Structure formats: structure tokens, C-alpha cells
Image (spheres, rainbow, N blue to C red):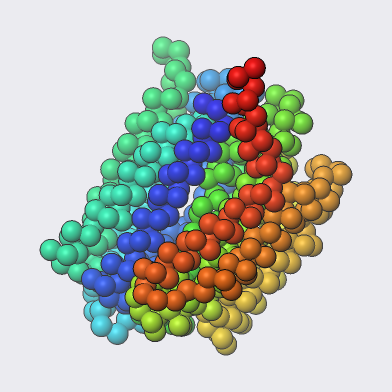
Amino acid sequence: MSLQKNIAASFASQIYVTLISIVMVPLYVRYMGAEAYGLVGFFAMLQSWFSLLDVGLTPTISRETARFRGGAIDALTYRRLVRALEYIFLAVALVGGASMLLAAWSIAGRWLHASHLSIDEVRVSVQVMAVIIALRWMAGLYRGSITGAEGLVWLGSFNASIATLRFSGVLPLLMFVGTSPTLFFGYQFVIAVLELMVLMVHAYRQFPAVAPGVRLPWDWTPLKPVLRFSLTIAFTSSAWILVTQTDKLVLSKILPLADYGYYTLAVLVAGGITILTGPLGSAIMPRMARLEAQGEHSAMIDVYRHSTQIVAVLAGAAAMTAAFSAHALLWAWTGNADLARESAPVLRLYALGNGVLAVAAFPYYLQFAKGDLRLHLIGNAGFVVLLVPLVIWAASRHGAVGAGYVWLSVNLLAFVAWLPLVHRKFEPGLNLRWYCQDIGVIFCATAGAGYLAHMVLPPQGSRWQQFVQIMVAGAITLAAGALASSAVRARLRNLWQRPALSQL
């Protein structure tokens, strides 16, 4: 499967999943209420914290699958590694899920601040969350192997189908059966079981066959060669969770559950930026790792630079549009003027921070392909030490807005101060070109176009009129970023010249 098809499939599915998750939220709030939706936001945050237990195993299976396809390891070694990881994932699912079940009483009674929902209803909801999270945890192993095999076209279609069931399939239940959070999470449990079963069957179909009579029992040996890489990934993944989820954890304790639901809405919209650009990373990491394993270093760098420009165009346009039109976007989306007024400052800060973060992730992809994450480990350790106390202090004193300012500031600091060190070690001479040619001109173009579009087309009129105006402004900003990208211009030039050449 070509890289272009994988990227296109990943983008298409992720755009769909992002859009359907965002479009459904106002309906959830309408039928369930803001307080119950606060539980949905708490559920999403718990899933992220549960991934701390991954200890780098999901990225490892993705990378080792890519290396197997590149001929770096043999089929039997790969199958033994998969079996060892299956046992580890199952053990973590059982222990982690059971621990969350036991903690449900304390979470419902002492951590969350519900005013209208009963403690028993919150407790049962948290217990069902624990089972769902354990099931999705197991699904992550098989999703990682499919990603490493570059089966992203199938995976994108499957993710879109599951998202349709997960986000829109529950709506008839809320409309005609009941609106309790326990009903909502009970439905999500059924979808989680279906998701795990399908992913497991598909992953096993693509695993290489082993010779008749060869057994695959639990064995620690296959993990030893990848243990250092896995533990490094584990630390950096833990740091990532601390960086991206500490504010949400702190605010879930500080804010009333209804206010936490409103905060979750703003962060969800801003999170669409990283969700929109994330599929590109999933597509290029196994490709970069395979190219490096095959000794095609210059081709790997070309993939790295071209992909950076694509993400800069998308993230820059989305971040600038959301920042300049935050209030109008929230009002057009929800129809709730109070929510829009309170959440707009949070959306603006998180959108800009996520725009920077989407591009700042690329040096990690370079280190991943090289199999050397030492600098990534050191950088994440330093920024966690800086970020966590700042988030706790700012969120405690200034709520969600304070956490937003810290989020934006720390991401800018990482982008300016740390990334040049990574480039200097792994690709000397690339840094200036990467900042200026691959990112700088694109961000300047999207910022300028976004500001001008907002001034010329200020959102006004009805909700639908404002939504159309925001979309037009976003399209103008996206077009400006695309024209500022040398990779996009080259692609357009090739498409323009191809018909002319065919007539010669």
C-alpha cells in the first residue's frame, strides 16, 4: 500500500471521526445535561491516564511490525514477540480494570462534584467506564500491529464505522429510551466488545504463519531486544500524558461537574487540531522506520520534511481559524450564548497551543525512526518538571483559563528551545531549513490570512450564517498556507504539467 493512500485513508477517517464526535456533543448536552456530559469528559481523561500502563508496548509492536515487513526480523521472532505482548496486555487490563472498579466509590463520592446526579449513578457509570477502558486497552495492541503493517486503509474504514456506532448510534437510545449516564456507558460497553473482536480477528489474519508444531508460549526472551526502546517510549508516553492530561485531572477535582463539562467542550474543539494531524504521524512513522532500516536515509528525510509542511498547513489554518473565531464558533456549534462566552478564551488558548504541538511532534518521529529516544526522554523529563507544577498552580488559581495560558506557553518554549537540539544531533544542517522553509512561511501565511479573513468577514447574523462565514474564513486561511508550502506548490505544479505532457 502506497504512503499516499495510507495518509489519505488516515486523514479521511480521522476527519470523519473528529467531525462526528464534535457534531454529536451538543446533542449529548441537550439530552443528558451538562453534568452528565461532564462524566463523558471524565471518561475520556481516564482513558488517557490508563495509557500510562502501556510502558511503550503499543509503539513497540507498531515499530517491530514495520521492521518485520522490512526484513529486519524473522517471522518466528515476530510471532513470539506478539504472544508475549498479548499476555502483558491481558494482565494489565485485568489489574488496571479491577483497580478502577474498586476506586469507583471514592471517585463518585470524593472526587467528582455532582449536584443533580446521584452518587450511586455516578459510581455505576465509573465502574462501567473501567470495563470499557480495559477492553479498549486490549484493542490497542491489535490496532498497533495493523498500523505497523501499514494497513491504514482498512483501519481507517473500521475506525469510521466504530465511531459512527459509538457517537451517533447511542442517540436513539437517549431520545427514546432514557438519558441516564449508565445507559450511555452501557451502550459504549457493547461497542467496545465489538471493536476488540473485529480488531483481533483482522490482526491475526495478517500475522505470518508459523511452522506446524511450533508453539508460542509465554516467554520473556522476545521482549529483551526491544526492552530498552519500550522503556524509553514508556517514559516519554508517561511524560506526554502528564503534559496533556494534568490540567484535565486537576480541573476535574476543582470544577463542578457541569462546569467541567463546558470546559471539556472547548478542549474537545481545540483537540480537533491534533486529532486532524495525528493520522499523518501514524502513517509516516512505520514508513520512516522501514526506510531507515533499509538504509534509505535521504528518502526518509524527504518524507519527514514533506509531511511537516502538510501538518503545518493543516494545523496552522485550523488553529488560526479557531483562535480568531472562538466565540462565534462555539455559539454557532451549540447555540448556547453563556457557554460560548465562558469557553471562548479556553478554546483560543488551547487551539494555538495545539497548533504548535502538532508540528513540534515531528522531531519525535525522526528519533522514532532512528530507534534512539534518549533526547526525547530528557526533553520530556525537563518539560514535565516545568509543566506539572505550573498547571496545578495556574488551574488552582485561575481555573481553565490559567491552565490554557500554561499550555500555550510551554508548547512555545519547547518549539523554540528544544527542537533545534534534536535536529542538530540527528540531521545536522536541517534545522534552519525546517524552521524557515517548512514551517515559518506557512505559519506566517496562515496567521496573516486568518486575521485578514476575520476582519473582512466578521461572523454575524444567525448561527448558520456565522458557521458559513467561519468556514469561508477557514478555507481562505487553508489556501494561504497551502500556497506558502513548497511541497504543496510542487505537487500542484506536477498536476498542472501532467495533462500538458500527455498531449505531447
Whether residue 483 appears in this view of the structure is yes
Q: Position of residue 413 (x, y in %)?
A: 74, 67
Identify which residue, 468 or 11, lies in the foreground: 468
Q: Which residue reaches farthest right?
A: 429
Q: Position of residue 273 (x, y in %)?
A: 53, 58
* Direction from residue 240 to residue 33 in the image, left or right: left
Figure label count: 0
- Image quadrant for the C terminus? top right
Whether residue 371 appears in this view of the structure is no
* Direction from residue 101 to residue 435 in the image, left or right: right
Q: Position of residue 99 (x, y in %)?
A: 39, 61
Q: Which residue reaches farthest top?
A: 212
Q: Is residue 422 above or below residue 414?
A: above
Q: Is residue 313 above or below residue 398?
A: above
Residue at left 69%, top 55%?
442
* Direction from residue 270 to residue 288 in the image, left or right: right
Q: Which residue reaches farthest left?
A: 176
Residue at left 54%, top 49%?
278
Residue at left 79%, top 53%?
436
Identify which residue, 372 or 179, lies in the foreground: 179
Identify which residue, 349 or 140, lies in the foreground: 349
Identify which residue, 45 or 324, lies in the foreground: 324
Residue at left 42%, top 37%?
155
